[in-house]
Image: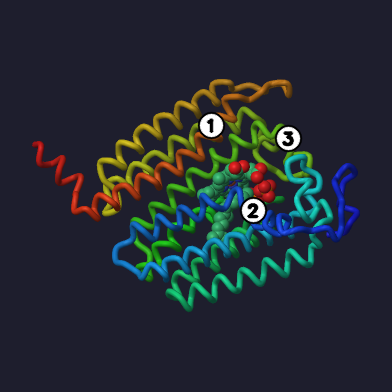
Amino acid sequence: MSDSSIQPGVRTEPGEAGFGDYFTLLKPRVMPLSIFTAFVGMVVAPGGIHPFIAFVAILCIAVGAGAAGALNMWWDADIDAIMRRTRNRPIPAGRVQPGEALGIGVTLACFAVVMLYLATNIVAAGLLAFTIFFYVVIYSVWLKRRTPQNIVIGGAAGAFPPMVGWAVVTGGVSVESMLLFMLIFMWTPPHFWALDLFMKGDYASANVPMMTATRGQKATRIHILVYAILLIPFAVGVSFTTIGGPVYLAISAVLNLQFVLGAYRVWSRNKDISDADNYAGERKLFRLSLSYLFLHFGALLIEAALRGFGIDGWAYIMGWF
Ligand code: HEM
Ligand SMILES: CC(C)=CCC/C(C)=C/CC/C(C)=C/COP(=O)(O)OP(=O)(O)O
């Protein structure tokens, strides 16, 4: 990562890193949703753990996610320097040295995994280690610059956190935790491609082969719609497992309808659109993707609370018949 990769116009203030720059390395805008899904995985898993252990586990997952973000920024500093959206990140802007970011990432990753192992169990710690490895090595190093399928395969990294949360409590995996994995796995492509459409060639400028650049807008739009539809059985399927229920089903049905309609609208503009376009539909779908995931996992918390009060939603509904 030489200084020659830093583009003209990038704010460069070497040696002036503040707390905010080190915090930014941990990708604090994107990671909270991942941490929330891990938290929900813990809450809905059968069995219980001491609240202090739960707190330590969430802290470890948050630190592990931040470490993965720092390592991703270390590896991607050269392309981040080229893209408008990322060129003021701490490394390309010269405020944090690449070696520092690498050191912080590796240290935090080791700390998070070892602490999680000591506080909980080997399965949870192993899954956290694998998640960090997947995001950094499989997605960032291997796939991101090589194939337009980068986020389809690499997106698995973002799908692991609820499985980690589940394993913290149970020490294992289950149909439920794998369904939560599949829900995020199938959600990631439409989430990202909607953003990629209105990013207007940002990734292409850095030679990252995202689908808009390699296959064009038309193919990207149809892929968004297809994934939004394929996502439905996984999202709705959770309703009929031990962690779902009628409240979740009702929320999921509305969210899936909204999401497919949004994807349909994006698809129905199935033509190359000029740069002057404001991409309102694509922006809306991206925002919808965030609330879609947040509310699905929020609905699982509601179901867990109802179970906590001894209310079995399905049994209640069956009682009507
Ligand atoms: C390979 C998979 C993924 C890719 C390539 C991707 C890509 C992106 C990108 C490029 C942004 C804009 C970030 C920014 O400008 O700061 C973004 C935003 C976001 N992503 Fe993803 N994402 C992925 C998976 C996920 C997952 C799994 C989650 C959470 C479970 C997630 C949550 C978010 C959130 C919350 C934002 C909004 C951040 C903000 O407020 O600006 N993403 N995503
Ligand atoms: C516990 C743990 C390790 C969680 C990690 C969860 C995870 C992998 C979330 C995906 C996050 C993400 C920002 C992808 C962005 O892609 P990008 O890195 O290509 O985006 P960029 O262009 O903004 O750098």
Q: Position of residue 44 (x, y in %)?
A: 33, 57
SS type, badge 2: loop
Residue at the spot 40% in from the left edge and 43% down from the top edge: 296
Q: Nearer the viewer, residue 62 or 172?
A: 62
Return the disc, 2 or 1, that comes first in the chain's sequence. Answer: 2
| Image quarter hosting the C terminus | top left
- In the image, residue 238 above or below residue 60: above
Mark 2 burial class by Cα count in 10 Å: few <14, some 14-19, many 20+: some
Q: How is the image coloured?
A: rainbow
Residue that numbered label 2 is attached to: 27
Residue 82, quarter of picture: top right
Mark 3 burial class by Cα count in 10 Å: few <14, some 14-19, many 20+: some
Q: CA distance from mark 2 to mark 3?
A: 22 Å
Return the disc, 1 or 3, that comes first in the chain's sequence. Answer: 3
Kindly identify which numbered label has been placed on residue 293: none
Residue that numbered label 1 is attached to: 285
Compared across the picture, whether 144 is left or right of 288 comes to right
Residue that numbered label 3 is attached to: 201
